[in-house]
Amino acid sequence: MSKNIQAGWNFDNSYAQLPKMFFTSLNPTPVHAPKLVMLNEKLAAFLGLNPEALQSNEGAAVFAGNSIPEGAEPLSQAYAGHQFGHFTMLGDGRAVLLGEQITPQGERFDIQLKGSGRTPYSRGGDGRAALGPMLREYIISEAMHALGIPTTRSLAVVTTGELILRETKLPGAILTRVAASHLRVGTFEYVVRWGGVKNLQILADYAIRRHFPEIADDENKYLSLLVKVINRQAELIAKWQLVGFIHGVMNTDNMTISGETIDYGPCAFMDKYDPDSVFSSIDTQGRYAYKNQPIIGGWNLARFAETLLPLLHEDAEQAVKMAQDKVSRFTELFHSHWLAGMRAKIGLFNEEDQDEELINELLDLMKKHRADYTNTFRALTLNQMDGMELFKTEEFSRWQNRWQERLERQQESTAVSKELMRKSNPAVIPRNHRVEEALEAAVEKEDYSVTERLLTVLSNPYAYTEEQAEYCTVPASTTPYITYCGT
């Protein structure tokens, strides 16, 4: 382990110590004229980095891949994945892992450059990224963090001074992504397919050391690993559902072992409540629709369980039975997290058998009257139920009476219930039109002030400030919102 005093880089490289089949060592491809346009100073400080040093030309050179900081061992990771249900060989086609930053608190985080050039896994791609999608990931990932949802984070964005060709020529950019790790379900799929049981065990032991050291001495630590990943994903996807977040591309290579949200491609937040919501241009069948995210989560975890079978038990039949038993509990775990979260969203502390019916009645009314998901709960929290068509209906009045009666059957006061609701219902989310507005200003005019203000507003989504009010409005446009993978 070595340390660059000026910038604060303090790299370790545990992933680089794994067998060579797991990665390819290579440096990023240098760019013409790197310019730092976004720096997450709070995250930098948390990581033990010096923001002032990172804002220098030397800092921009590191974020662009033109300069390799002392102690880094750059590499691109190999993995596979089920993409829309079909298995394929993958890998970091446009990303390079510089190494693992060890924070002053002793925590370990991957530092990855996304859009840093071709790798052996590029499969014909140019290895580059456009400015718009990189800023999009910066905005959404930091908003998710502020919402209290486990996520990879964004440290910096640099423009490259080069144009990349997609449908048109676009300004190139590189995102510096920070993650607990980039271990994926797809990493295990790759190793079990091409690496054999020995390498599978090495990977599983590495995942346990890195994310779940408390299970290292369990009688069957690999079964415990499966349980840990199932638990984290059940909680994560419940949190997505509770804020109306749609990932858009829940392939197995986009499900992390750590339980972090990863890969902000065609993602979006719902405006009007509709369980069938799909925004991704490539998800023509709605496989990854809002309502299907818990189902796909279970499907992906079944694929993860399959990779662990050789480690679970020497008897194949017994291994399958053990895995099925654990995976079958995912739906119940997810539902438990979701129901607890929904109770909090309407101010309930205790549990009654009819709570889920009360919650589903509200959701059905929201769907019927095309009510905005976030703003409905915001209005209930503030007791400002005007303006929305939903609140003018007789159906809602009846529901509201039942809700008030339910609140009165718990010991907590109205004020305490409202405080719970404020902590559970964000006043603001990254509204799709606001994100697009920020990206357009940056890409078309090199104006980053719109992005910076949006990030400030999203940094404390439960604050309910006056400044946030204008970011709660929903555009009148009926044109369906469409997102793209951003490759």
Image: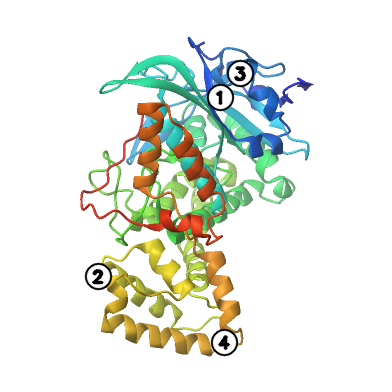
Q: Residues within 10 Å of mark 2 (few under 14, many from 20)?
A: few
The C terminus - image quarter: top left
Distance (Cα) linking label 2 and label 3: 51 Å
Give the mark, 1 or 2, whose residue is nearer the N terminus: 1
Residue occupied by mark 4: 410
**Display coloring:** rainbow
Q: Residues within 10 Å of mark 4 (few under 14, many from 20)?
A: some
The N terminus - image quarter: top right
Residue occupied by mark 1: 22
x then y, percent, for residue 332: 48, 66
Asked if labels 3 and 2 touch by Cβ distance under 8 angstroms, the answer is no
Q: Please identify, in this view, whether the residue under mark 1 or under mark 2 is nearer the observer.
A: 2
What's the mark number on residue 368? 2
Q: Along the line of sight, which residue is nearer the eye, 129 or 307? A: 129
Residue occupied by mark 3: 62
Distance (Cα) linking label 1 and label 2: 50 Å
Distance (Cα) linking label 1 and label 4: 54 Å
Q: Secondary structure at mark 3?
A: helix
Quarter of the image for residue 102 reads top right
The amino acid sitting under disc 3 is Val
Q: Secondary structure at mark 2?
A: helix
x then y, percent, for residue 242: 45, 61
Asked if labels 4 and 3 touch by Cβ distance under 8 angstroms, the answer is no
Distance (Cα) linking label 2 and label 4: 29 Å
Give the mark, 2 or 3, whose residue is nearer the N terminus: 3
